[in-house]
Amino acid sequence: MSSLFHQTRSTLRVPIWGALRHSWLQNAFLGHWTSPSLLRHYHDKAKPNPVEYTERPRFDRTRAKPDKSKSPPRDNLYGISAVQAALTAKKRHCFRLIKQNSNDLADDPTNRTGSIFRLAEQHGVPVLHMPKWEMNVITQNRPHQGTILEAEPLTVPRIERLSEWKDGKYEAIGPKKQRTTVLAEKPPVWLLLDQIMDPQNLGSILRSAYYFGIDGVVVSTKTSAPFSSVVAKASSGALEFVNLFTASSATQFIKSASDAHWLTYGTACSPSDGKQLIQPHQLENPDRPIILVMGNEDLCQVLVTIPSHNSQMDSIVDSLNVSVATGILLSSLRCQRSMPPKTTVEPNETDGLAA
């Protein structure tokens, strides 16, 4: 019994793959799964059909880039003021007007929405009704007030320099020396915007410029926000009415304006390079045209600062928003323009005015 037991244990210690070397064990354990015909069957089945592969390429380069020539670029203007201004100014082609389904106010003659649809009907702009959630997708959840206007982007003329104001007129000179004569009995006031990247600020500034009757606004295209639908909404429609121009270089525009005897004002918190620093109430009414520069004050002749009246102001909030500062300065300039030019007065009267 002992010898039989040891013989059985020695037999069980033989490796299984060593035992499979015998042909009868291979047929018993592997059998059908190792047959060459079956392996060839699965190998051929895994191969792709060569005819199908050649007829259906994985990447069709002819369809990689869609043809955009048939669909011109469009701006989705939203908000009652922006849409109504675009239809009234007629500076851009309008494709269609989108109206919210639940906003049934077109029949009310006293409502601004009704006037919008009457303008669209007069200009032959088709009207499309759409649910609110789809309009929210178009405007990226911005407040559209139930009105969206699909229109082409606003075309803004380019300007290179302004000529000297003389005999009640001056010229706006564009590329290829294109000249536009502007009549102005009083010295004009222009606004130059540079490095205004926030579309909300840009729209708010344009709204203030139109409100205060600024003669022209020049925006540096390389360093400022584009004239998008966000700018149109923030301007409350002023984008369509203000005399707007673009300039490729704000620095060159300021230099050429100074050479043409335009007075350039800039903003600063402290004096620099020995330049004169004044406050808004110290702005005079010179018999010269003025350009207020916001964003690039290095080349300006006079710097204006807006003082704070908060004695406990923290250094974290030490300045005004650029749109707010622009509105204050434009108001001060317009107030000075409405006043007669200053004459020579006695010293005691000067002290009283300064106080």
Image (tube, rainbow, N blue to C red):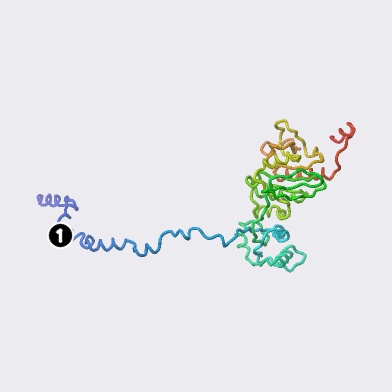
Could you tell whether 350 is left or right of 298 in the image? right
Percent of width and height locating residue 327: 75, 46
Could you tell whether 60 is left or right of 165 in the image? left
- The image shows residue 347, relative to residue 317, as above or below, that is above
| Number of numbered discs visible in the structure rendering | 1
> Which of these two is toward me, 42 or 74?
74
Residue under pointer 1 = 24
Which image quarter holds the C terminus? top right
> Which of these two is toward me, 311 or 175?
175
Mark 1 neighbour class, 10 Å CA radius: few under 14, some 14 to 19, many 20 or more: few
- The image shows residue 130, relative to residue 271, as above or below, that is below
Percent of width and height locating residue 300: 72, 37
> Which of these two is toward me, 44 or 194?
194
- The image shows residue 49, relative to residue 168, as above or below, that is below
Kind of residue indicated by mark 1? Trp
Q: Residue furthest bottom?
A: 107
- Quadrant in which residue 124 is drawn: bottom right
Percent of width and height locating residue 90: 71, 60
Mark 1 lies on a secondary structure that is: helix
Percent of width and height locating residue 243: 73, 51
Q: Residue at 62% of width from left, 46% of height from top? A: 222
